[in-house]
Amino acid sequence: MIPKPESLPKINRFKRGKGLVIVNTGNGKGKTTAALGIALRAAGYGLKVLIFQFVKGSWLYGELESLKKLSPQIEIIRAGEGFVGIVDDKLPRAVHEKAAQTALENVSQRVTSGVYDVVILDEILGAIAGNLLKTEEVVMMIKGKPDYLDLVLTGRNAPQEIIDLADTVTEMVEIKHPFQKGIYAKRGIDY
């Protein structure tokens, strides 16, 4: 028998134990999707979740519409100006750098605010790999997080310093992808 949502026990953040640092990295698909699964699970237990998107910009993603329905339990902030140097990016690099730096300052304040139980930093590792952020800045934020807070970082090319700090690291490995057959991203599956 499946319990009704209202019968799920609400979790006291201070009885949850040590907050984890979770890294979803690699060249395969599924990094953000896995993080969103954590957000859904946490919200089901009454935890407050922040999803902070670095880089992704103004593209439309199906999860944005779904997450609106879970507000205020799950809050999402889109802070990037889009992927750097691909497809339709016509912005100067300095605009991307400023957006990433502003985003890091904003999310660093939110991480220590005491408001959230789970914070997802979507594509922050991509922002580091693209030299929009410095690894040391992100490491300082991770080390300064409250003990109870679970922190999820996604993106390709996770730096070794962050892997070393993490409790869980999952590498998504691409074995096969529809793009190799000329099939482009599919609405409802890829975005």
Image (spheres, rainbow, N blue to C red):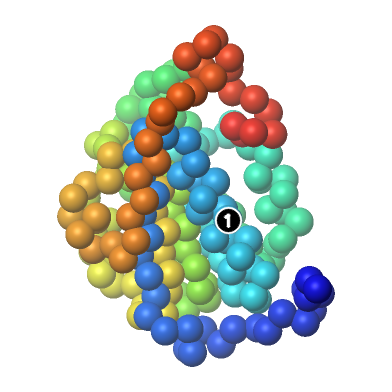
Question: Which residue lies most toward the front here?
Answer: 1
Q: In this view, does 75 lie to the left or right of 66?
A: left
**Percent coordinates x, y for residue 124 in the rendering:** 37, 47
What residue is at 69 percent from the left and 34 percent from the top? 188
Residue 49, located in which quarter of the rendered image?
bottom right
Residue 98, located in which quarter of the rendered image?
top left
**Percent coordinates x, y for residue 73 in the rendering:** 66, 68
Whether residue 45 is situated above or below residue 49 in the rendered picture = below
What residue is at 64 percent from the left and 75 percent from the top? 45
Q: Is mark 1 on a helix, strand or loop?
A: helix
Q: Which amino acid does label 1 sit on?
A: Gly
* Quarter of the image with the N terminus in it: bottom right
The answer to whether residue 2 is visible is: yes
Residue 6, located in which quarter of the rendered image?
bottom right
What residue is at 39 percent from the left and 41 percent from the top? 172
Residue position for label 1: 37
Q: Is residue 104 left or right of residue 38?
A: left
Q: In this view, does 56 lie to the left or right of 162?
A: right
Q: Which of 98 and 174 is in front in this view?
A: 174
Q: Which of 104 and 182 is in front in this view?
A: 182
What residue is at 24 percent from the left and 55 percent from the top? 163
Whether residue 188 is situated above or below residue 69 in the rendered picture = above
**Percent coordinates x, y for residue 174 in the rendering:** 40, 31
